[in-house]
Amino acid sequence: MHSHLKVDGRFWLTLDGKNFLGRGRIELLQRIRETGSISKAAKAMKMSYKAAWDAVDAMNSAWQIPLVESGPAGSRLTKDAERLIAAFQRAEAQHTRNLAQLAADLTLDD
C-alpha cells in the first residue's frame, strides 16, 4: 500500500505568461527590506550578488516600474513591491489551503 501519496504544487504569480514572483523572489524582496541592501540580502540567502541583482532587474523590468530602488544610501522597496508581497502571501496561503483540501478529498476508488 502506498500511504505516502500526496497532493503537491508550486505557487508562482505569472506576468505575460512568464514566472514573475515565487517564494524565492518574495524572500529576496523581504531581505532587501530588512537589510536595505541587495548585496546583504543576497549574502543572507547564500546567493551571488549577480543572481540577486539579475532577479531584481528582471522584476523591475517585468513590472515596468521599479519594485526596488537603489541609491547611495542603499536599496529600498517601493509601495508596489510591498503590495505585491502582501498579495503573493494571501494568494499563496489560499493555494496551500486548496492543496490541503485536495489532499483530504483524495481517495482511490477500487
Image: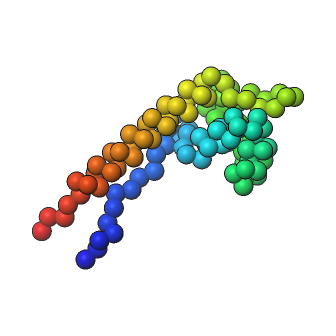
Q: Position of residue 66 (x, y in %)?
A: 68, 26
Q: Residue furthest front?
A: 34
Q: Tell which residue pokes out farthest to the bottom in this image.
A: 1
Answer with the quarter of the image where residue 25 lies.
top right
Q: How many marks?
A: 0
Residue at 39% across, 43% down? 95
Q: How is the image coloured?
A: rainbow
- 3 or 52: nearer the eye? 3
Among the 4 quarters of the image, the one containing residue 23:
top right
Could you say where residue 61 lies in the image, as x and y percent from the top left? 66, 31
Residue 24 visible to the viewer: yes
Image coordinates of residue 101 in percent, x first then y, are 28, 49
Q: Is residue 48 above or below residue 82?
A: below
Which residue sits at x=25%, y=77%? 1
In the rendered structure, the answer to whether residue 104 lies left or right of residue 34 reads left
Quadrant location of residue 8? bottom left
- Which residue occupies the foreground of this view, 102 or 14? 102
Which residue is farthest right?
Answer: 72
Residue at the far left in the pictured view: 110
Q: Which residue is rendered at x = 76% and y = 35% of the image?
A: 36
* Left or right, residue 75 beside residue 93: right
Q: Is residue 50 visible?
A: no
Give the answer, above or below, for where 24 lies relative to 56.
below
- Position of the C terminus, as image quadrant, is bottom left
**Residue displayed at 45% across by 50% down:** 10
Note whether 15 is above or below 24 in the view shown. Answer: above
Q: Position of residue 48 (x, y in %)?
A: 76, 52
